Amino acid sequence: MTVAAIAPASAAVKPAIIEAKAVSVVFNGSAAVDRASVAIHPGRITAICGANGSGKSTLLKCLSGLEAPTRGAIQLAGQSLSGLSRRQIARQVAVLGQNPETPAGLNVEELVEQGRYPHRPWLTRLRGNDRDAIERAIAAVDLKDMRQRQLASLSGGERQRAWVAMALAQEPQILFLDEPTSFLDVRHQAELLTLLRRLNREEGLTIIAVLHDLNQVIEFADDVILMKKGQVLSTGAPADILTPRSLSDAFGCKVDVIPHPHTGRPFCLIDWVGHDGGSDRAGDH
Amino acid sequence: MQASRAVSLKLLFSSGLGLLVLLSILALMQGGSLVAWSDIVAAPSRPETLAQAIIETIRAPRLSAAILVGVCLAVAGAIMQTVLRNPLAAPDILAVTTGAQLALVIATLLVPFYVPSLAATVFGGVLGGLSCLTLGGGLRAPPVRLALAGIALSLSFAAISSAIVLMADDRASGIVLWSAGILDQTGWTKVATVGPAVAVGLFVVSLMAPSLDLLGLGEDSARGLGMTRAVTLLALGVSVVLAGSAVTLGGPIGFVGLAVPNLLRGIGITRHRQVIPLSAIWGAVAVLIADVAAQWLSAEGSSIPTGAIVACLGAPAMLILLRFARIGQEQRPRAVSISSRLPAGLLIAVLLVASAVAVASALAVGDGIAKTVPELVAVFDLRAPRLLVAMGAGMLLAGAGVFLQAATRNPLCGPETLGLAQGAALFSLVALLGGLPPGSPGFQLVAAAGSFAALFCLFAFGVHRTPERLVLYGIALAASLGACGTIIVVEARLQTMQALSWLAGSTHARGMDDAATLLPWLLLLLVAAMSFCSRLDVLVLGDDTARSLGLSTSGTRLAAAAFAAAFVAGAVSSIGAIGFVGLLAPHAGRLLAGPKHARLLPVSLVLGAILVVVADMVGRSVIAPRELPAGIVTALVGAPVFALLLNRRRS
């Protein structure tokens, strides 16, 4: 299935869960996001790609309600985001920030407990259903054996999973992640993406992530939003969007796209060291 | 661009020199009508008049001292900033000034034989600077950590100095003058002894100007260009000698070394051939302005310390600095201090035993130790109210610390590092002057207005982009407010012991009524604690996370800070600005109970109470029948522990 820009065809099948119309965010006179219109569809994994400073993180913050757009409107499940209280948003949307701060001494379970905050009435303790949600979240990320461990003592990958568990304890319909793989080695990146994919496929969690690695995007995402200088260049399925021409437009460097030897999906080859060296050695082969 | 730079350089030199001459004339003519313009014009020919005598023996020495102090501090600051590549470095910030002051106090009051004062100050300055570098993380330490280590040490050194002065000097007023920086000279002796050292120092610095330019490029590049560690150490050594000279002449005067070079760099002057002489000129101008203002304000026989005027200007200078100067290498503390936890049973046992010991010793020990039951009964009426007041105030301060540290997500915040305590203390002094009886509702309201005013100053100017900036500004604000307090005490000739208790914190002569006035504040603390625990837990996860969990962060932060300001007001209006309890108790609480506020808050409150009770007990007993204010005792203990906590954060 091809998802075209704003995807009216698929929207007719399943209405967009988040819809941004001509959203702009202006910092100090310059637009970090410039009239971006996107639609996020439920149950899908959407990746936001683009060069540094192209407005990916700002768009993600807008869509998740952390940043109010200067202009334009965003709807969450048909309701205007600006009309919802922070708690109302937090019951539907969870956000895992880029390299979040961890207070020293907090252990895994205590962190995950915080995910119940939007569901707890004022001045009450955790109740049975809160406990259940916490248990499910810890089990989902496979940290049962480490629940009493302090966050500071965990490896980068385990800590990232603990944060995912906190977001899951929120019982959201939508999970936003800002560069979730940036500080992890390849194995932990793979583990995290596998976990997220499983949550998406098995629990129907809608996932929106800012990702840097184009080949991760092709394998992981159902839809891509490609950005450049605050504007949305194109949206759609990775295979349709990540073409040599659009990538060189978005990133300003030469990218070849070849079929993956095993899966047959597109595979991005970036020209790392300039045209001369590259073509020389290509001639040697 | 080049042309305008050249013009502005010329303008800076000429206007600086012009101002210097103008201020010098003003300084000579200041204070009574004894010296007229004609006397100043005639002075070089040395006529035998009274005016000439005044000029030669009082005013000219003071003028020279002021100029020398300004030159020394600003040049020393400029060198330290370059060598450490740290815009926050300055003699007072790096504990060099207070180290020198402590050595001077010891040499003058404790050592039985004569020690040349310059030798003492240089020695103390070296020790202070070295301890600061050691605690802050060495020559490559990140700027803000080094600055905070230095400030903590400074406070500790200042507390030791105060304790020594209080013990040696019967008049409590001595402490105010000793610790604030005064330029009164009796003749030329000091200027004559220090002058040559300053001249040699400045000569060496002028030779080093090109090397300093290289050091500014960073240690690695400088080494790559052939620079050695010896140059770094020589430069630091010279700067310490200059700072020591300044202390010898005028006592601990702050902020000049920090502000002047940074302001010059902020307007684009970077070559040391220009930075050093311009710093010297404008440093002298700054100190002279403060000195002229001090003499003008204290015209009626009282003498306002010049250092207090300088400190008053500290907060605005720091504000400008933090807004406009480029301060690199900033780190967000990724974690709130260190944390561990004891099992609940053990924790409760530890707290119970500690409280019991504190309460028992507070009742038993004081001016004399009560060993038998009748003796205890005899002193009970005197000591029990002080114990209750100390406990209540300790709880309030600790509660304020927990709320502030959560609201700012900053382990270095406390009522005293953000100026809230000093604001409340300053307003308390004003209320005291206005005739409001301490402990009355009006008095408490005025104190609350003080802590809220400090809170407003803190957050109204938008420097809190990083936690360290907030604390630095807070510390400057605290210094300014404290200096205003000193000026009020000197100017109004308040009964110094009574005033001192608001400046330093003391439970002297508190009765049951005072204990009762704390009750409403403690009730507020209870309500706030119950309703805010879970919100504080979410808040410490960081802004974005907290908001994505559904917490309105700005509102919660504001409410938490406001609660903290109220607690501070309650504590300060009853016992004065006791330092370090609010900063330390939460850290100690975290060590015992972990980071969750439902446990952390009650444990911190108990620890805060214990801390003040013990400090008060020590202060009452070590130099009985006189008393060391509890605030000096807490600073003595608190500042080093704070520095250690800072150090632990590195690992």
Image: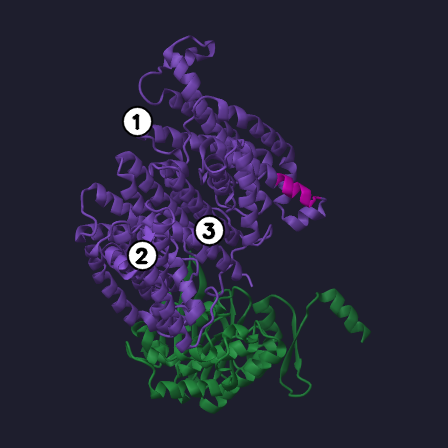
Chain colours: A green, B purple
Q: In which chain is the residue bearing label 1?
A: B
Circles 3 and 1 in contact, beta carbons < 8 Å: no
On the image, numbered disc 1 is attached to which residue?
B299
Nearest-to-viewer mark from 1 and 2: 2
Q: Is residue B457 visible?
A: no
Report, in whole angstroms, how far the alpha carbon at label 3 lies from the one at label 2.
36 Å
Residue B280: give x, y in percent of width and height: 52, 32
Magenta residues? B227-235
Q: Are marks 3 and 1 on the same chain?
A: yes
Q: Which mark, residue B152? A: 3
On the image, numbered disc 2 is attached to which residue?
B370
Decide whether residue A276 is among the magenta residues. Answer: no
Decide whether residue B233 is among the magenta residues. Answer: yes
Q: Residue furthest bottom?
A: A202
Image-based side of A229 in relation to A123, left or right: right
Hey, what amino acid is under mark 2? Answer: Ala
Report, in whole angstroms, how far the alpha carbon at label 3 lies from the one at label 1.
35 Å
Image-based side of B539 in relation to B13, left or right: left
